[in-house]
Image (spheres, grey):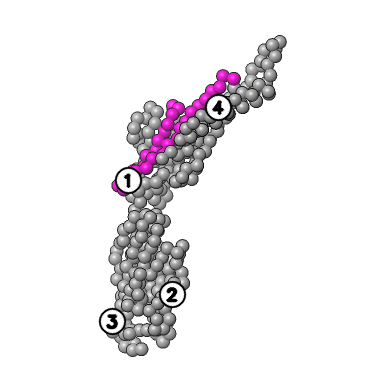
Amino acid sequence: MNSAPAQRWSMQVPAEVSATAGEAAVLPCTFTHPHRHYDGPLTAIWRAGEPFAGPQVFRCAAARGSELCQTALSLHGRFRLLGNPRRNDLSLRLERLALADDGRYFCRVEFAGDVHDRYESRQGVRLRVTAAPRIVNISVLPGPGHAFHALCTAEGEPPPALAWSGPALGNGSAATRSPGHDHGHQVTAELPALAHDGRYTCTASNSLGRAEASVYLFRFHGASMASATALLLGALGLKALLLLGVLGVWATAQHRLEHPVTPDAPPRPQAQESNYENLNQMSPRGPPAAVCSP
C-alpha cells in the first residue's frame, strides 16, 4: 500500500433529490481521499437527520482487498448500496419511499488497518418525498346541547388543502384549520357545526391529486322512545338499513318489557334522556374513526 498523499478528502453529493412516495430514490455520493491505491478494510455508512450524530440507516464493511461490501445494517431492509466504495462511490438506493423518509442524509467512509482515516459529508443530500393526498381520519364528535362537529385529517406533500361539503354548505366550502393539529405532512380541518342531517364530505387536494371521504349524520327521534339517538353511518347500504331495523325492533321490545302499560293506569311520564352512538366502519386506507367512504 502506498499512502503518499495524492489529493485531499472531499465528498460530492447533490443538494436535493426528489421522489414520489411508494417509489425508489437514489442518493448519490462520491468521494476522494489522500491515500493512493488503498485496499485495506473499509466501512461505508449513511446517517439520517444530522451528520456525525444522526442515527445510522445503512452500514456495510469490506475486508482487505475485497470489493464486496457486506451489509451489516439496512433499516427496515429498504436501503441498498449501489456504488462500489473501492471505486470511491457510496451511492445508496432507498426502496418503497414513505413520507417519513423525507429529510437529510449523510454519507461517510472509514478506513482501518494500516491507515486510520475517515470522512463524512457535512451538508448531506436533502431527500424530498412528494405524495398525493390521503385522508387518514374523518370523524364526527358530539358537543354541548346535542350539537356535533366534524374533523378531517389528511396527509400529503405538498400539504393538501382541505374543504368540506354537505347539506346547506354547498360544494367546496372552506374548512377551518384546527390550531395545534397540523403536524409534518398532515393537516387537520374542522367543520364547527353540523346543522342538518345528511352526508358530509371532506376533500383533500394538492398538485399531485385529490382524495375524499364522507360521514353520514342522522338523528332519529322514535315516537315510542324518549331518547334521541344520532347515528354516524358510512357506505353501509342495505346492511345499514337492516341493522337499523333490527335495532329499532329490539329497542321497542325492550321498552315495552321495562315499561308495560295497563289499561287501568295511564303511562307515567319518563324523564327525557339523550344518547350518542358512533357506529364505526372499517376503512381500507385509514384508521377507523367515523365512517369513511372513498
Give the percent coordinates (x, y) of residue 255. Answer: 64, 23
Residue behind mark 2: 70
Q: Is mark 2 on a helix, strand or loop?
A: strand
Q: Do the residues labelled 2 and 3 touch (CB within 8 Å)?
A: no
The image shows residue 40, relative to residue 255, as above or below, that is below
Q: Work out how far the residue at label 4 is from the one at label 1, CA to CA, in angstroms.
A: 39 Å
Q: What element carries label 3?
A: loop
- Mark with earlier residue (2, 1): 2
- What is the number of the mark on residue 138? none
Query: Is 209 part of what is drawn in magenta?
Result: yes
Q: Measure the alpha-carbon separation of dots 2 and 1.
A: 41 Å
Residue type for callout 3 = Gln
Label 2 vs label 3: CA separation?
27 Å
Mark 2 crowd level (few <14, some 14–19, many ≥20, 10 Å Cα): some
Which tag is nearer the camera, tag 3 or tag 1?
Answer: 1
Per the image, the residue denoted by label 1 is: 209
Q: What residue type is labelled 2?
A: Gln
Q: Spatial distance from mark 4 to mark 3, Cα to Cα?
A: 82 Å
Q: Quadrant location of the C terminus?
A: top left
Q: Which of marks 4 and 1 is in front?
A: 4
Give the residue number, with chain letter if any, for mark 4.
Answer: 245
Q: Earlier in the sequence, mark 4 or mark 1?
A: 1
Q: What stretch is highlighted in magenta?
A: 195-224
Residue shown at 37% from the left, 84% from the top? 39
Residue at image position (45%, 43%) is 137
Q: Above or below — where is 7 with respect to 28?
A: below
